[in-house]
Amino acid sequence: MRQNNTISTRHAYTSARPDIIAKVPQSALHILDVGCSNGTLGAALRAMVPNRVVEGVEFDETFCKEALDRLDQVIQGDLNQFDWQSHFSGSVFDCMIFADILEHLVDPWKVLRQAVGHLKPGGTAIISVPNIRHISSLNSIFLHGTFPRIGRGVFDRTHLRWFTSTDARGLLADSGLHLVSLSAHLRINDIPDTPLNRFAQRHLVRFENWSWIREFLGYQFVLVGTKN
């Protein structure tokens, strides 16, 4: 992978994610960031509320070392084989975050169900997943007859699972979560900062709830659920 792509990919997984932060309840004092990367998101959340505790789970060793300087606790582990009871026995969280992590797992449904067992009743789960129904998929698969495998985005080569908005809603429901909101990040093409995408984010966002806008121009979905 060329260096500029490596930098771009790293940034995609280490940004503060203001879209996620905006969904976290102010009242949440004990937060678990699942797939916390280098802890940038969790550090921002810690700084916002006095006495807020943010813990993380992360597979990558380098990210873990960086996150340890920013969060209250970080556990290095493979979520595909993670023993939730062993690591979090007696722990109950007000909020859990799964930002761009579930699509990388073998069985995200199982992982989310196990994690939600440590979310307090009425607690909040925030999940972001790419939208495989995005118009770029139609272009690649139906017009060009190929399923790309690239370094980032909807067709990130490390993705093992793919979701539409219906699939993402089902993921929450299967885990005992009640859907509170679903929002979409709008893009017309795959490259983040292009005139077309700036146009979409500036002018089409008002139509985000129109089904065809959300389903085909939604590049990523952010879902908020509460534990039943």
Image (spheres, rainbow, N blue to C red):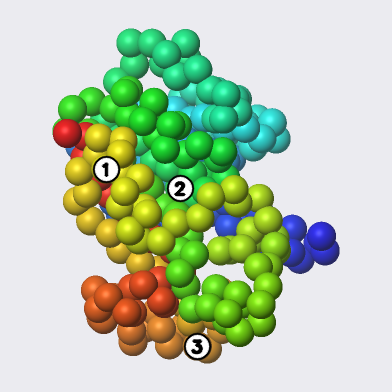
Q: SS for tag 2?
A: strand
Residue under numbered circle 3: 196
The residues bearing labels 1 and 2 have C-alpha atoms spaced at a distance of 18 Å
Q: Residue at x 65, y 30 (%)?
A: 65
**What is the crowding at mark 2: few (fewer than 14 residues within 10 Å), some, or many (at least 20)?**
many
Earlier in the chain: of badge 1 and badge 3, it is 1
Asked if the residue under mark 3 is in contact with the one under mark 2, i.e. CB atoms within 8 Å, the reply is no
Asked whether residue 214 is in view, the answer is yes
Q: Earlier in the sequence, mark 1 or mark 2?
A: 2
How far apart marks 2 and 3 lie (CA) works out to 25 Å
Mark 1 lies on residue: 173
Name the residue located 37 percent from the left edge and 54 percent from the top edge.
167
Marking on residue 31: none
Three-letter amino acid code at the position of disc 1:
Ala
Which is nearer the N-term, disc 2 or disc 3?
2
Give the residue type at disc 3: Leu
| Quarter residue 192 falls in | bottom right
Horizontal side, residue 166 vs residue 190: left or right: left
Q: Nearer the viewer, mark 1 or mark 3?
A: 1
In screen coordinates, is 84 left or right of 2? Answer: left
Nearest to the eye among marks 1 and 2: give it: 1
Q: Quadrant of residue 53?
A: top left
The one nearer the camera, 57 or 161, is 161
Q: Residue at x 20, y 43 (%)?
A: 178
Label 3 residue SS: helix
Q: Amino acid under label 2?
A: Ala
Q: Which residue is mark 2?
A: 99
Instruction: Give coordinates of residue 119: x percent, y percent.
Output: 29, 27
